[in-house]
Image (cartoon, rainbow, N blue to C red):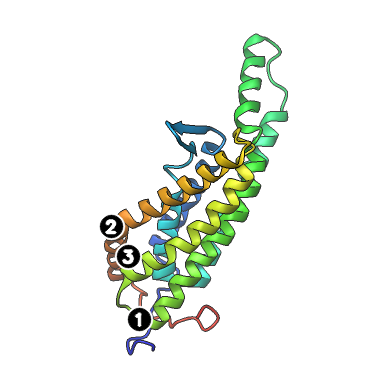
Amino acid sequence: MKSTAPARYAALGSRYFGILLAVMAVIVVLSGIGAVKGVQFGPIITDGGFFLFPFAYILGDVISEVYGFKVARKAVFTCFGLSVFASLSYWIIIILPGFDDDFGHQRQAALENVLGPVPQLVAGSLLAFLAGQLMNSFIMVRLKARQGERRVWVRLLGSSGVGEFIDTLIFCTVAAPVIGITDVGGWANYVIVGFVYKVAVQYLFVPVTAVVINWIKRHEPSYGLEAAEPAAV
C-alpha cells in the first residue's frame, strides 16, 4: 500500500550533486587501484580497497534518495566511464618509454606490478559496480515510492544487502586470481568477508547517512519539485 505522501526528488543544478558525484568517482577509481593488493588479517582475506568501497554505496544511497533513479543511474555510468579512462591511462603510462637506467627499470617494474593487473580488476569491478549499484538504487527508489518521505532508514537498510551481495560476488570472482587467491576456500573467505564487511559499514553509517540526506533535502532548493519517476517505480 502506497504512502499518502508521494515520493519527492530534487532536480540537478545545485552544487550538491556535483560534489557527491566527484567524491563517489574518486572512491571508485582508488578502490580499483587498492584492490590489486591482497590483504590478510589472520584468517580474514580481503584486498587493499576494502576500506574505501562501501562509501561509494553510501554516496549512491544519498544520490538515489535525493535525486532519484535516473540521476543515480547517470552517476553510476559516469563512474564507470571514469574508471575506464583511468584504466586506459595506466596502460599508456606503462607503455611509455622510461629512463634507460637501473632507477628507470625499477620504477617501470614497480608500475607494471601495481598498475598492470588493474585493467582486469577494473573489468570485474565495473561489471560488479554496475549490477550492484543499479540494483541498490532501484530498490531504494521502489521503497520510496511506497513509503514517501518516511522511513529513510528502512530504505538504507533494505537496499544495502542485495546490491552489496551482487557486487561482492561478481568482483571477488574476477579479482581472486589476480591478487593470488586460487582455491575455493580462499575465494569463499574473500566473498563472505567482503560482503559482511561492506554491509556492516553501510549499516554502521545509516544514522550518519540519514542525517546527510535530510540536510541535503533541506538545503537543496529544488527538492520536492520533481515528481516520482514512473520508469523507476
Residue type, mark 3 in image: Ile
Residue 84 in view of the camera: no
| Image x and y of residue 181, in percent | 60, 36
**Which residue position is annotated with label 3?**
213
| Image x and y of residue 151, in percent | 30, 74
Q: Nearer the viewer, residue 78 or 188?
A: 188
Residue 179 in view of the camera: yes
User: Is 188 left or right of 104, judged from the image as shown?
Assistant: left
Residue 20 to residue 43: above or below: below
| Image x and y of residue 97, in percent | 73, 23
* SS at circle 2: helix
Numbered label attached to residue 148 = 1
Q: Between marks 2 and 1, how big is the CA–CA gap?
A: 20 Å
Q: Which image quadrant is residue 4 in?
A: bottom left
Residue type, mark 1 in image: Gly
Numbered label attached to residue 208 = 2
Residue displayed at 65% across by 9% down: 102
Q: Nearer the viewer, residue 169 or 105?
A: 169
